[in-house]
Amino acid sequence: MSLTLLILLVTVAVSMIAFSNPGLQDKLMFKPYRIDGNREWYRFVSSGLIHADWMHLLVNMFVLFSFGEIVEFYYQQTFPEKGPVLYFLLYFGGMMTAVLPTYRKHRNNPGYNGLGASGAVSAVVFAFILFNPLERLCLYGVLCLPGVIFGVAYLVFSYYMDKRGGDRVNHDAHLWGAIYGIVFTVLLKPSLLIHFFEQLVYFRNAI
C-alpha cells in the first residue's frame, strides 16, 4: 500500500468518526488559543485529520488521490533511500507549516477554530507543479491550464481571498502549504529549480 493511500484512509476514517462525535472533533480541531495556553501542540496535526463535512473531505481526498501517488513516486525516484520518509515530511510538514501564520494571528482568540487537510494537500499539489510545470491541471474538468499558470493563479487568489476575508475559509493555509511544498522540495534537490525554469523556457520558445 502506498503512503498516500494510507494517509487517505486514515484521514477518511478519523473524519468519519469525528462527524458523529462532536466531542472528539472539538479535541482534534485547530484551536490556537488552547495550543498557546495549554500547550496542545498535537492539534497542528490532528486538525488535518478531520473535516467540516463530506464535501470538504471529498474534495481534499480527491485532490490528494489525484496528485499524491504521482508525487510519492517522484520522491521515491529522486530520493531512492529516503523517498517515503521525505514524502511523509512533505505532507505533514505542509500540514503544520500551513497553519503557523494562523496560530500567530489567532492565538489570543478563544473563538477561532480550524480543521482540514488543505494545507498538506496544497503542499503536494505544488510539489507536483515543481516537477511538472507544464502538465495541464483542470479545474472541475472544465478549465485546463499548465500547472505553473494554475499555480500562480491559485497563489494570487489565495492571497487576495485571505486579505478580503469573510468566507470562513483559511486561505492563508492554502497559500503557505503551497509555498512549503515548493521550498521543501527545492531544498532537498536544488537542481529541480533549474529543471523547472528550463521547462518554462522551452514552453516560452514553443509558443
Image (cartoon, rainbow, N blue to C red):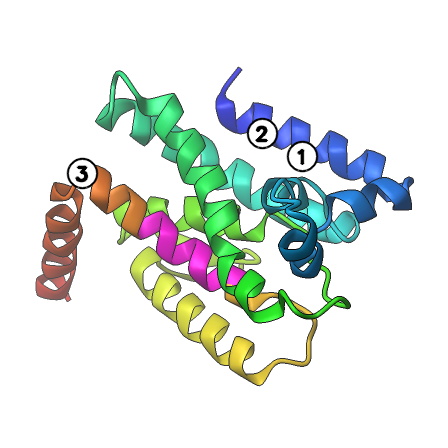
Q: Residue at x 76, y 39 (%)?
A: 15
Q: Is residue 171 above or below residue 58?
A: below
Q: Nearer the viewer, residue 41 or 153?
A: 41
Where is residue 72 drawn, in percent x and y?
39, 29
Q: Determine whether, in the image, residue 12 is placed left or right of residue 20.
A: left
Magenta highlight on residue 72:
no
Q: Residue at x 31, y 51 (%)?
A: 182
Judged from the image, the secondary structure of the residue bearing numbered disc 1 is: helix
Q: Nearer the viewer, residue 134 or 63?
A: 63
According to the picture, the residue beneath numbered tag 2 turns out to be: 7
CB contact under 8 Å: marks 2 and 1? yes
Judged from the image, the secondary structure of the residue bearing numbered disc 3 is: loop
Q: Nearer the viewer, residue 80 or 206?
A: 80
According to the picture, the residue beneath numbered tag 1 turns out to be: 11
Say few, some or many: other residues with alpha carbon within 10 Å of mark 2 (under 14 / 14 to 19 / 20 or more): some
Say few, some or many: other residues with alpha carbon within 10 Å of mark 1 (under 14 / 14 to 19 / 20 or more): many
The stretch in magenta equals 173-182
Q: Residue at x 60, y 44 (%)?
A: 41
Cα–Cα span, label 2 and label 3:
24 Å
Q: Is residue 75 above or below residue 192?
A: above
Cα–Cα span, label 2 and label 1:
6 Å
User: Counting residues from the N terminus, which is met first, the one under dot 2 or under dot 3?
Assistant: 2
* Quarter of the image where one finds residue 36: bottom right
Q: Determine whether, in the image, residue 43 is placed left or right of residue 184.
A: right
* Amino acid under disc 2: Ile
According to the picture, the residue beneath numbered tag 3 turns out to be: 189
Q: Determine whether, in the image, residue 186 is placed left or right of residue 9.
A: left
* Amino acid under disc 3: Lys
Indicate which disc residue 139 carries: none
| Secondary structure that dominates the magenta span | helix
